[in-house]
Image (cartoon, rainbow, N blue to C red):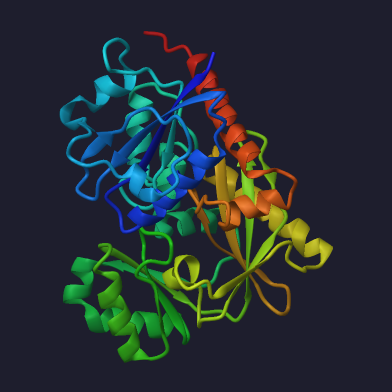
Amino acid sequence: MKKRIGLLYGGKSAEHEVSLSTACAVTGALNFEEYEVYPIFITLDGEWRCGERLEQPASTIEELQFGDDANILENNITNFLVSEGGENLQFDVVFPLLHGTNGEDGTVQGLLEVLNLPYVGNGVLASSAGMDKVVMKQLFEIAGLPQVPYTYFIRSEWKTEQESILNRCEEKLTWPMFVKPANLGSSVGINKASNRQELKEAIEVALQFDRKIIVEQGVVAREIELGVLGNDFPEVSVPGEIKPMTEFYDYDSKYKDGSTALIIPAELPTEIVASLKEQAKRAFKILDGSGLVRADFFVTANNDIYINEVNTMPGFTPVSMYPLLWQHTDVSYPELINRLIALAIERHEEKQQLHYKKD
């Protein structure tokens, strides 16, 4: 019997377009002989719209953006996801292909947990902690994973304590610095600052995307990424190297101008690869990850290793780093998707074995 898959994509996030590209790519890799595929589009305004069951892969992202004539779920999202009969469906697995806030940050995962639905990827804790760069770094710090120095603050503090915050950055960090929204991915809102004025300007840009800002010390290093796949016993892919032709790996480099080289596998000493894999696995377990993460590192000329961050729902098109890492680890794109679906079902079945007894 075919499994019913609900593809959930779009979302209220600056990474909305990235999510659409991911969803389009995934439809091209799913086996329609094995799965019934139902698209669920979340608009930028947060409206949930369900399209007709897909009979074949979407050829463009426009096909996945349903207009006002679509089934707009509004207040019956719960019934749609869990009920049978009529036009409602019971999904065997929901595949959240959402990037950024309102989707990758534990919010949708929490909804699916309450509805007791299997879903692909990380749970509430890993998703929320992995989305917030400050919380993530604090957890890694407690666990002893090496990181570059950083500091952080929130919007209200910036409004009343600008000089103090700028002084703190200059006292704790050295130039250049990187300014980032704490809760966003795909390098949205990130800028490099080489002096105090540029730092102020970069902070103002980042505050357009989030109330919490993190400032990190720049480091001269290679950018190395690894894919992690699994639940309790995760596997780690070969490492890949990011070589941006621009000053750093920003949003345009990732998705628009093609000015970045991806070198897979990265040329690294055997002992460094082993250390990277061990740290990637540790980071995954620290967050209590499930399904997948992409772990990003800096490796200096002296082979010092610093973990930068993990991404709990990395870019997932066939030309994105995460699937390419697994392709070079002998796991094809369609096989990767099948394994993620199987891992989602495995994790859900384990949860069903728990018994809650009244005192």
156 relative position to 311: left or right = left
125 relative position to 221: left or right = left
* Residue 231 in sight in this render: no
On the image, the x and y values in percent for residue 325 come to 66, 54
On the image, the x and y values in percent for residue 231 come to 60, 34
Asked if 66 appears above or below 352 in the picture, the reply is below
* Residue 67 in sight in this render: yes
Q: Quadrant of the N terminus?
A: top right
Asked if 176 appears above or below 28 in the picture, the reply is below
Determine which quarter of the picture holds residue 194.
Answer: bottom left
On the image, the x and y values in percent for residue 219 come to 56, 79
Determine which quarter of the picture holds residue 230.
Answer: top right
Which residue is located at x 30 percent, y 45 percent?
65
Which residue is located at x 25 percent, y 36 percent?
49
Asked if 114 appears above or below 183 in the picture, the reply is above
Nearer to us in this view, 123 or 165: 123
Determine which quarter of the picture holds residue 31.
Answer: top right
